[in-house]
Image (cartoon, rainbow, N blue to C red):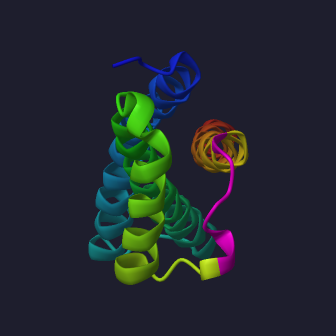
């Protein structure tokens, strides 16, 4: 049974999303804690509350992409090990995605190159959301420094 190196490569790249998810989760929890602290101490300004809410919102959207990327990483790894059975396993995967996830039938039968591009596009979105979240956090820190 042969292993498809391109599918292994895509799976490996997609697994990097797990590290991003960890960074984003830490910042999301911190933003929640700081947001609640500001509300409880009645010291939160509107800008502060909105900043914390934006950090949490970006974190939650990033979490959605992280779950999708992790699912794709698992699927690509499984398909990379399918060897000569890849066409049959692909058909079974398309049937399962249509049945359980509601993927439209017209998306079945896509090439693995198209699937790879789509999965890597999700990873890029996850990276952008994580970067935006950290940029907002950095801007908040800078604003706090000049506010004092």
Region in magenta:
106-112
Viewer-proximal residue among 78 and 85: 85
Residue 54 inside the magenta-drawn segment: no
Q: Position of residue 52 (x, y in %)?
A: 50, 63
Q: Is residue 83 visible?
A: yes
Q: Is residue 66 above or below residue 105?
A: above
Examine the image and state in which quarter residue 99 appears: bottom left
108 falls in the magenta region:
yes
User: Is residue 80 visible from the viewing direction of this image?
Assistant: no
Q: Specify whether 4 is left or right of 19.
A: right
Residue occupying the point 64% across, 48% down: 115
Dividing the picture into quadrants, the one containing residue 138 is: top right
Residue located 42% across and 72% down the image: 95
Residue 73 x %, y %: 42, 39
Q: Is 58 on the left or on the right of 63, as rendered?
A: right
The quadrant in which the N terminus is found is: top left
Name the quarter where the C terminus is drawn. top right
């Amino acid at each position: 049974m042969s292993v498809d190196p391109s599918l292994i490569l895509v799976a490996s790249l997609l697994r990097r999303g797990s590290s991003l998810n960890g960074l984003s989760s830490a910042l999301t929890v911190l933003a929640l804690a700081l947001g609640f602290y500001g509300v409880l101490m009645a010291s939160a300004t509107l800008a502060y509350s909105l900043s914390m809410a934006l950090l949490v919102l970006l974190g939650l959207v990033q979490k959605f992409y992280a779950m999708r990327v992790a699912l794709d990483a698992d699927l690509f790894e499984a398909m990379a090990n399918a060897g000569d059975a890849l066409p049959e396993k692909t058909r079974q995967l398309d049937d399962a995605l249509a049945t359980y996830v509601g993927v439209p039938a017209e998306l079945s039968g896509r090439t693995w190159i198209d699937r790879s591009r789509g999965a890597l596009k999700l990873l890029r979105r996850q990276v952008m959301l994580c970067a935006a979240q950290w940029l907002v956090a950095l801007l908040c820190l800078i604003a706090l420094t000049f506010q004092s």
